[in-house]
Image (cartoon, rainbow, N blue to C red):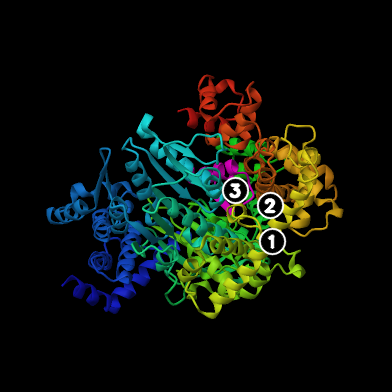
């Protein structure tokens, strides 16, 4: 009956006419144009009545229209003359969108005034969605309820849901429920980037504090072999850190694994590694519960197939809790800044002009358009401006800050500015931008600075955030408006439709507003038209892509074609090491079956034969090769042979191969020599240019805990012909790519092969003296006390300052925490934002 009535409403041309009219009126007011409204109009009552009917429909298109109509009407007319607060509450309750009920106070308390029949209806609905944890009552959406029920039943789940669907809300409470039982429990939460480690760890830490003494440890840094594994812990790590923990601790396993941004399994080398890590975790704990979560994957069934799991439940949320409005902005006259704004509704409606404006500003370049259009149309609101790279982001932010130069700085702005100077450099442009409510955000910024920027955006102290594609990597940072103009991901690749929809889903902040706006500037000249593309992607695991679509290059890597030795093909090399390891363990055909390559087929025969030929040339055990999964087995073999030849010269020669600790005086020469070997054998680089010596110097400074501003000062003195801002940006990239990525894997490979070579030669005592350089490079510290401070969740900047105050440099995590708690925080001499880090740890 109700579906028939919904269909009848939907088929009525008058409803769609009224909906378009209310949309245009709302948008004009949203864009600052005066509008005339009559809240007593019967037109309004009919529209809200239609929304109440459509909210009961099973058709997603009907339900989206109901949400839009009801929220537009409510925001335009309020509830002074009509009980639109009550009407909106009814619509939201029927949609099961309970989080949005708390967006406005009058809607939140409107249940006290509802007619009995409607109140009874709502109570009946909410009873089905009610969740009680620790005495707190929560009401879940249909999607959240599905997820919660599945998790509590210990089901394995693959889900696709937009940013605002409330996935994190359920996951946090599920993890909390796991640890209400005092028995041993290990959860591994895999995130795609280091930037997300701190965000997820902080969010979980805040939520779990109510457990008091039963709160589990939150571990973000892999331990050394002497570290004792906790029996109640949540590991928040990238796949690289999980892999290191798996290699270090034979007993490292989990009962629950959460794979956030699971679509990154398609990302070249890191995608292969992610798959491998999950396979290893399943091998160690075959019954573990696993959740694959992503914003938009069409072929969710791939996770069950890829990991040989027949019991993975697949479901998706296609009903966001916040609506998005897509607005195309056309520049009609660049000199006077004449623009026209058009709506395409939720991205599928016919284009229709809303209004025309003259900004009286030149809109010639892409940067001009992003700066001035966002400054006018986003004034007084929370805005994200999408930039095509770090340099682009800084340029846009500087110009926006100039436009808002009259904005007075508050204490948050000052503290954030001081942190930018302290964490990066006194000349870092972010330090000036934030004073005027403008910030930028990109991958190579220090984590604690990025988190502080995000916190200032959430608090409303930053109105304009200029960011790059980093925002697509799981960072949960919605805003009222998003501005884009010919957006790209990377240097030259237009933004794909699935990335576009992922970004667009961040327009509109749950419980703050009902709508979000995405402004598409000069859309007619975009290289790709993402509005016409799919919202969800069909993804292909990286290892499958390597075999099926890059097979010629893969076979070249497997055969160790010397003509390609100078090329660093990490994705293909990781695929080769994975397949070689599978061959040695007898698991190759299992892996091939899971990606659709059947036994006896031409592909399987050719691959098995090539790997067999490689095996004749590689004498290293598979378990040694797999410790460095992103470096070809052939390259590892050559490095091992080099080391073995040196060791055969005698113990004194073998001692020269041992890396020095960063605090030793010979450390620089030691690292330069090691990198020379790695750059020649692994990267195929010409070492006569001494790049390895430069990187050894930066690596040494980084591991010794040298502040980033001092490292950058050294680069400024070295690069005198470059603009200072460029040097600062290049220095951040240098640390993140050459040191925290490249050097980590090279020293990791060198150490693993050296340990094996020394053990094989009977020099076990020498092997035990090798320092944990990959860990030191990853965290930027080599004193155990400083590493312990970082493992507690403190930033490198804070840990470095505390390490300088501590007389002992050998404190483990518990001793470091006790040291902190024994001192008044105000006596530590930290700036406000760094002090807040310490306060959150010792609370």
Q: Which element type, helix, strand or loop, lies under badge 3?
A: strand
Q: Is residue 128 left or right of residue 833?
A: left
Residue 253 visible in the snapshot:
yes
Q: Nearer the viewer, residue 98 or 80?
A: 98
Q: Position of residue 349 (x, y in %)?
A: 42, 75
Judged from the image, the secondary structure of the residue bearing numbered disc 2 is helix
**In the rendered image, which residue does mark 2 sit on?**
742
| Residue 402 located within the stretch drawn in magenta | no
Numbered-mark total: 3
Residue 583 in percent (x, y) is at 55, 64
Q: Which segment is the magenta one? A: 437-466
Q: Horizontal placement of 405 versus 510: left or right?
A: right
> Residue 447 colored magenta?
yes
| SS under mark 1 | helix
Label 1 environment density (alpha carbons within 10 Å; few <14, some 14–19, many ≥20): many
**Reading the chain from its start, which is encountered first: label 2 or label 1?**
1
Of residue 482 and residue 709, the one placed in the foreground of this image is 709
What residue is disc 3 on? 438
Using the numbered discs, state the Cα–Cα distance from disc 2 to disc 1 in whole angstroms. Answer: 18 Å
Which residue is identified by label 1?
634
């Amino acid at each position: 009956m109700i579906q028939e009535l919904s269909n009848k409403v939907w088929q009525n041309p008058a409803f769609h006419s009224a909906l378009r009219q209310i949309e245009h009126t709302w948008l004009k007011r949203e864009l600052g144009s005066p509008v005339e409204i009559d809240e007593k109009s019967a037109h309004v009552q009919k529209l809200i009545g239609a929304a109440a009917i459509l909210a009961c429909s099973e058709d997603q298109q009907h339900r989206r229209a109901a949400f839009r109509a009801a929220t537009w009407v409510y925001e335009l007319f309020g509830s002074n003359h009509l009980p639109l607060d009550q009407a909106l509450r009814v619509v939201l309750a029927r949609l099961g969108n309970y989080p949005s009920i708390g967006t406005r106070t009058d809607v939140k308390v409107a249940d006290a005034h509802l007619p009995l029949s409607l109140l009874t209806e709502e109570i009946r609905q909410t009873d089905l969605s009610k969740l009680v944890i620790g005495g707190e009552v929560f009401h879940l959406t249909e999607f959240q309820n599905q997820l919660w029920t599945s998790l509590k039943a210990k089901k394995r789940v693959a889900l696709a849901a937009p940013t605002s669907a409330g996935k994190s809300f359920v996951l946090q409470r599920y993890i909390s429920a796991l640890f209400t039982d005092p028995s041993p429990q290990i959860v591994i939460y895999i995130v795609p980037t280091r930037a997300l480690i701190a965000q997820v760890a902080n969010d979980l830490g805040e939520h779990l504090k109510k457990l008091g003494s039963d709160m589990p440890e939150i571990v973000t840094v892999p331990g050394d072999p002497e570290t004792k594994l906790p029996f109640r812990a949540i590991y928040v790590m990238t796949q690289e850190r999980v892999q290191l923990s798996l290699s270090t601790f034979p007993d490292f396993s989990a009962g629950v694994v959460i794979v956030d941004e699971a679509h990154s399994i398609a990302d070249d080398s890191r995608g292969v590694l992610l798959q491998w890590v999950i396979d290893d975790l399943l091998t160690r704990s075959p019954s573990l519960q696993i959740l694959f979560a992503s914003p938009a994957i069409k072929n969710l069934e791939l996770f069950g197939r890829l990991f040989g799991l027949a019991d993975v439940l697949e479901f998706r949320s296609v009903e966001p809790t916040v609506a998005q409005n897509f607005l195309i902005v056309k520049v009609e006259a660049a000199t006077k800044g004449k623009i026209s704004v058009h709506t395409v509704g939720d991205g599928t409606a016919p284009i229709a002009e809303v209004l025309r404006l003259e900004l009286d500003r030149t809109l010639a370049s892409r940067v001009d358009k992003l700066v001035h259009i966002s400054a006018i149309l986003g004034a007084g609101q929370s805005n994200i401006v999408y930039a095509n790279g770090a340099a682009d982001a800084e340029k846009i932010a500087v110009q926006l800050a100039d436009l808002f130069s009259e904005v007075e700085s508050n204490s948050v702005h000052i503290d954030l500015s001081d942190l930018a100077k302290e964490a990066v450099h006194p000349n870092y442009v972010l330090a000036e931008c934030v004073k005027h409510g403008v910030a930028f955000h990109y991958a190579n910024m220090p984590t604690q600075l990025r988190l502080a920027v995000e916190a200032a955006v959430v608090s409303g102290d930053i109105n304009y955030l200029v960011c790059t594609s980093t925002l697509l990597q799981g960072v949960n940072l919605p805003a009222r408006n998003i501005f884009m103009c010919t957006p790209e991901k990377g240097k030259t690749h237009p933004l794909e439709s699935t990335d576009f929809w992922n970004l667009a889903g961040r327009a509109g902040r749950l419980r703050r507003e009902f709508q979000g706006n995405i402004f598409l500037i000069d859309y007619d000249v975009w290289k790709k038209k993402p509005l016409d593309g799919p919202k969800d992607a069909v993804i292909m695991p990286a290892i499958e892509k390597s075999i099926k679509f890059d097979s010629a290059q893969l076979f070249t890597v497997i055969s160790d074609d010397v003509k390609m030795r100078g090329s660093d093909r990490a994705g293909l090399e990781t695929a080769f090491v994975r397949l070689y390891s599978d061959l040695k363990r007898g698991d190759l055909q299992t892996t091939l079956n899971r990606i659709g390559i059947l036994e006896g087929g031409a592909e399987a025969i050719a691959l098995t034969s090539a790997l067999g030929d490689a095996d004749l040339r590689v004498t290293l055990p598979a378990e040694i090769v797999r410790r460095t999964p992103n470096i070809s087995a052939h390259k590892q073999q050559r490095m091992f042979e080099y080391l073995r030849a040196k060791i055969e010269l005698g113990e004194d020669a073998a001692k020269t191969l041992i890396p020095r600790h960063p605090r030793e005086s010979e450390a620089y020469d030691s690292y330069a020599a090691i990198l020379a070997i790695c750059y020649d054998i692994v990267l195929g680089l010409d070492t006569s240019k001494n790049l390895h010596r430069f990187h050894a110097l930066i690596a040494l400074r980084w591991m010794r805990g040298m502040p980033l501003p001092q490292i950058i000062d050294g680069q400024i003195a070295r690069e005198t012909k470059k603009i200072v801002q460029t040097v600062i940006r290049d220095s951040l990239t240098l640390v993140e790519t050459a040191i925290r990525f490249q050097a980590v894997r090279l020293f990791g490979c060198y150490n693993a092969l050296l340990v094996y070579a020394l053990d094989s030669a009977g020099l076990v005592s020498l092997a035990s003296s090798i320092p944990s350089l990959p860990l030191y490079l990853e965290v930027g510290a080599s004193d155990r006390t400083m590493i312990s401070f970082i493992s507690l969740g403190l930033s490198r900047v804070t840990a470095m300052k505390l390490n300088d105050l501590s007389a002992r440099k050998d404190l483990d995590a518990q001793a470091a925490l006790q040291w902190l708690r024994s001192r008044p925080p105000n006596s530590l001499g930290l700036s406000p934002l760094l002090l807040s880090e310490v306060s959150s740890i010792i609370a």
